[in-house]
Amino acid sequence: MPATGAKPSGTTDETDAAQAVRQMFDSIAPRYDLLNHVLSANVDRLWWRRTARRFRPILADPDASVLDICCGTGDMTMALLKHRPQGARPILAADFARAMLSRGALKFGGPGVGARAAGAAYAVPLEADALHLPLKDASLDLIVTAFGFRNLANYEAGLREFNRVLKPGGQLGILEFSEPGGLMGKVYAVYFRRVLPAIGRLICGKNGPYNYLPTSVGNFPPPAKMLALMQSTGYEGCGWQPYTFGIAGLYTAKRSLVV
Ligand SMILES: C[S@@+](CC[C@H](N)C(=O)[O-])C[C@H]1O[C@@H](n2cnc3c(N)ncnc32)[C@H](O)[C@@H]1O
């Protein structure tokens, strides 16, 4: 049975699961960026950049409305911003963990952050739950989410909520980990399931979050199931592009024109 949503250990229902996820990310926020870069040997930066490049045509339109959901500390948002022209409509960068979002806001915030050039594109932080977005129906041209979707308490509800706020024909990009097959998969599994949690524990001084990471990737639907779920929730042109031997990959789709 494929998982219907994230279930951190000890949680019994979706409300419980969402709360545990939020608390976990709030608790690791101070060390999140350092851990990310160390554990991925900086390959995460390539993945964010590659994802942003995929949506260059939409991002280049100054009037396009763009949401980075589960933005965390904002590195995906920063990669998207690189493709926004001067004076573009700000990107909405949303997350439900305040400690993660406030770190992100320091990077991508509005005019006045750092030495931002006048007119440079920026993002607006929004504290919001991906399953209950405070946004109007059919209001967005693009939704991107990086390494956040797997943490939702209900994947189908997440896809339906994204579908609600996307314009017909609007695009969705979900960057997520996956489990590579073959010999590479076996070698990677040792790193991901044994080495990574140990390093995570060392740097952030906590057991839970870096045990949760491999478990949650293991429970996440494999590409064929995820694509079928996207198709059944109102998307067309669904595809998956593996990154770095399939350690990660980008799901892409458009909201169907016919609902
Ligand atoms: C692994 S981090 C990814 C952060 C960032 N996108 C990145 O690529 O580094 C996952 C983020 O998803 C957020 N998240 C998980 N479930 C969420 C939900 N239901 N609504 C909003 N944010 C959520 C967490 O708070 C966390 O900041």
Image (cartoon, rainbow, N blue to C red):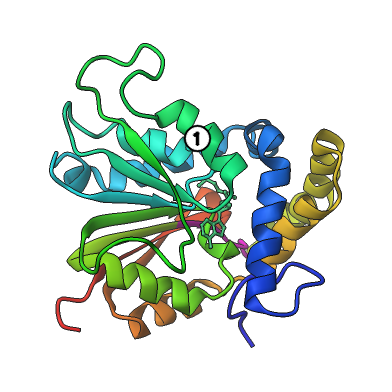
Quickly name the residue at label 1. 104
> Please, is residue 28 above or below residue 252 in the view?
above
Confirm whether the magenta stretch covers residue 178: yes
Q: Position of residue 88 (x, y in %)?
A: 18, 34
Q: Position of residue 105 (x, y in %)?
A: 46, 33
Q: Position of residue 158 (x, y in %)?
A: 45, 71
Q: In the image, is the residue at mark 1 within 8 Å of ligand 1 by its beta carbon?
A: yes
Where disc 1 sits, the SS reads: helix
Q: Quadrant of the N terminus?
A: bottom right
Q: Position of residue 159 (x, y in %)?
A: 40, 72
User: Is residue 219 shown to the viewer in this render?
Assistant: no
Considering depth in this image, is 131 or 214 the residue closer to the camera? 131
> Please, is residue 128 above or below residue 37 in the view?
below
> Please, is residue 95 above or below residue 137 in the view?
above
Q: Residue 14 lies in what quarter of the image? A: bottom right
Residue sitting at 31 percent across and 61 percent down?
135
Callout 1: few (<14), some (14-19), or many (20+) C-alpha neighbours within 10 Å?
many
> Please, is residue 7 above or below residue 106 in the view?
below
Tell me which segment is drawn in magenta: 175-181
Confirm whether the magenta stretch covers residue 183: no
Considering depth in this image, is 198 or 96 the residue closer to the camera? 96
Which amino acid is tagged 1? Answer: Gly
User: Is residue 236 shown to the viewer in this render?
Assistant: yes
Q: Among all residues in the image, which is located at the extreme bottom? A: 1
Q: Residue 241 lies in what quarter of the image? A: bottom left
Considering depth in this image, is 257 or 222 the residue closer to the camera? 257
Q: Is residue 55 left or right of residue 222?
A: left
Q: Among all residues in the image, which is located at the extreme top? A: 115
Residue sitting at 20 percent across and 84 percent down?
259
